Image (cartoon, rainbow, N blue to C red):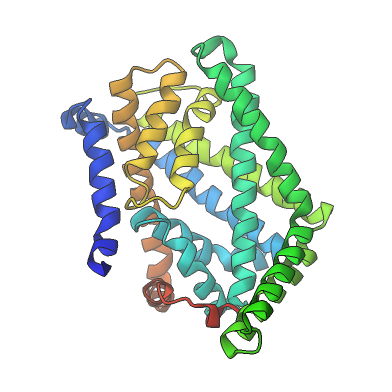
Amino acid sequence: MSLLKRFLPYLGTALIIWLLLRQISLHLIWQLLRQAQFEWVAAGLGWYVVTIILRAYRLGTLLAMTGWRRPLSLLPDVLALSLINNLLPARAGELSFPLIMQRRHGLAISESLVLLFIVRFFDFLCVIGLFVVFALLNSANLTKATGSFILSLSLLLIPLLVLGALLPWLGSKGLQAITWFMQRLGQAERPFSQKLLAGGQTAVEVIGRVHKIETYGRVLGWSLAGWLTTFAWFTAFLAAINIPVPLPLVIVGAAFATLSKALPLATVGGFGAHEAGWAFGFHLIGMPADLAIASGFAINILTLLASITVALFVFSVNPHLFRLQFKEWWESGRITAADVSSE
């Protein structure tokens, strides 16, 4: 069973990629990458760096870091999260991130998990919101089927906003429910349960600390800016492979790719899931299916290379930092409830 779990992401990736590649030629992907224009690749790389910086400031806002310099200390952490998610199966960066933040910044694992949840919440909110806005503004350039997706995602914003508003209440009630359940089982006094409940209490306190209109407003601003620059690097990479698409239409087309890649699916680095979402989204803006699939692979490969390039530069400046990030990823699979409340 353990062997199957280890290879499942690779099998899932291979299956999805095989299904997609049945519709196109590998030569088409190679042709797109071979003709990539350096100046547009450099522009995309620049937008990638800006995005990482904006994400560091967003995380710094949640950690109540003051000044413009302190959040920049989070750049290696945000970069490692992006790199590991782009390289490894099932969003593995999400598991390594709490350990990285614990070792480098002294945060409890439960606190890091809450902050990561809030970050992902705003990611979904921003991507869906941007899709709805730009799809409505560009409805004349989209296929007829797009209307139903605009309506569905617009309706999805309502429960997301309700969830954000009720987060402290839900956290508190959830902790009470877990405590009651442990007591009914007669397990509340066991060390394992005590540590789990302590971690839950820390999580509730963190939610209460950051649940402020001012904080959420700033996090929303950083998130929107970060996603606009993300779509800008997609736009630059598309221009690099001679598929010029205006930024508003890239936002509409790439939204499904970013949402599908954000899910913890059994794929390696999001390969397969990203391309499926990309092909679907760009089909909505009228791109031929074969070109949509091939460009999805090409953009994902360029993004992975950008992530590796920036990481190599940052970690070459501080090799110890690279060893630490790798160690945390290696140990991330061993996070247990006993770790959740540890400082």
In the rendered image, the residue lying farthest to the right is 213
The image shows residue 277, relative to residue 332, as above or below, that is: above
237 or 12: nearer the eye?
12
User: Where's residue 187, x and y in %?
Assistant: 61, 84
The image shows residue 228, relative to residue 151, as above or below, that is: below
User: Where's residue 153, x and y in %?
Assistant: 61, 30
Give the side of residue 71 with respect to residue 283, left or right: right
Where is the N terminus found, in terms of image quarters? bottom left
Give the side of residue 287 with respect to residue 17, left or right: right
Task: Identify the residue at horizontal 52%, vertical 66% (top origin).
Answer: 77
Q: Quadrant of residue 85?
A: bottom left
The image shows residue 315, relative to residue 185, as above or below, that is: above
Give the side of residue 12 with respect to residue 337, left or right: left
317 or 234: nearer the eye?
234
Q: Quadrant of residue 6?
A: bottom left
User: Where's residue 28, x and y in %?
Assistant: 21, 27
Q: Is residue 34 visible?
A: no
Q: Is residue 226 visible?
A: yes
Where is the C terminus found, in terms of image quarters? bottom right
Task: Identify the residue at horizontal 70%, vertical 64% (top origin).
Answer: 174
Total numbered labels placed on residues in the image = 0
Task: Identify the residue at horizontal 59%, vertical 66% (top origin).
Answer: 113
User: Where's residue 4, x and y in %?
Assistant: 24, 62
The image shows residue 335, relative to residue 14, as above or below, that is: below
Task: Identify the residue at horizontal 58%, vertical 66% (top origin).
Answer: 74
Give the side of residue 178 with respect to residue 4, left or right: right
